[in-house]
Amino acid sequence: MKTAITGATGQLGRLVIQTLLKKTAAKNIVALVRDEQKAQDLQEQGITLRHFDYDQPEHLADALQEIDQLLLISANEIGRRTPQHQTVITAAQQAGVKHILYTSLLHADRNPLGLAQEHRETEALIQASGLTFTFLRNNWYSENYLTNIAHAVETGTLFGSAEQGKISSASRQDYAEAAAQVLASSGHDNKIYELAGSNSYSLSDLADYISQAANKKSDLSKHQCRRLQASSKCCGSTFRFSRCYCRCRCPCRTRRII
């Protein structure tokens, strides 16, 4: 069984490959990458590299030749995901790929987040393709909060917009292990898996964890969504991501770390 993985040099892609190597031989794995120079370490482990650029659709089908199953890790260009994913799905059809796995979003069919729309569209495209599929609907990554921790400690404020809503995030490693398990086993045709962490926490809980680690006390105060959006941009997020991050989540809250 030959398995190809998109975004193989990305954070999730690398973890999937390293986990999958514990379950199958390197010769059975194909890393699909835009820049082969960034994947030399994978090649040194015996993994085949193939150039794969969503913006060069004319070459994608060739890269998928003799591939039995394809893990399509969702692209990171919000607003361009659906057309990019469409080119991959079309190439998979042309190349005779039998099965496609897609890293979607938790409860994508009814999730109110703005980010969910492109996942819904991609799922629909895959279902209409005639290929057998597995949807790995990943919840929020715990690592998404790491970018803001230093800023929170420095400024004394943890920005967030979930109020006291519970978050069941999981690490990328957890999601990678789930993907690798599905890739290395059978019985997953046309299945949808909702994936999330076993434990839930609120942003208040997260602020408390940070406060404890930084040896600071915390207090809670309200802020408007535009402040959350501005803060996420200051922390390095794009405007489009920060807008999606805030959407459907007002009123916002921040947790004050003192």
Image (spheres, rainbow, N blue to C red):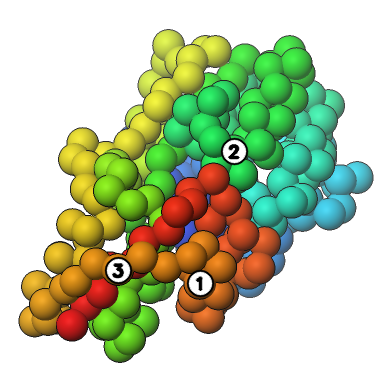
In the image, 137 versus 235, the foreground residue is 235
- Disc 3 secondary structure class: strand
Residue 240, relative to residue 64: is it above or below? Answer: below
Q: Which residue does the image show at 18% across and 40% down from the upper left?
A: 199
Whether residue 7 is visible to the viewer of this picture, yes or no, is no
Real-space Cα separation, disc 1 to disc 3, in angstroms: 12 Å
Residue 2, located in which quarter of the rendered image? top right
**Label 2 neighbour load within 10 Å: few <14, some 14-19, many 20+:** some
User: Mark 1 or mark 3, which is nearer to you?
Assistant: 3
> Residue 197: where, in percent of width, then height?
27, 40
**Label 1 neighbour load within 10 Å: few <14, some 14-19, many 20+:** some
- Which label was assigned to residue 8? none
> Residue 28: where, in percent of width, then height?
51, 37
Residue matched to label 3: 221
Residue matched to label 1: 227
> Residue 60: where, in percent of width, then height?
80, 43
Amino acid type at mark 1: Arg
Amino acid type at mark 3: Ser
Residue 4 is left or right of residue 151, and the answer is: right
Residue matched to label 2: 116
In the image, 190 versus 22, the foreground residue is 190
Q: Are marks 3 and 2 in contact (CB under 8 Å)?
A: no
Of callouts 3 and 2, the N-terminal one:
2
Of callouts 1 and 3, the N-terminal one:
3
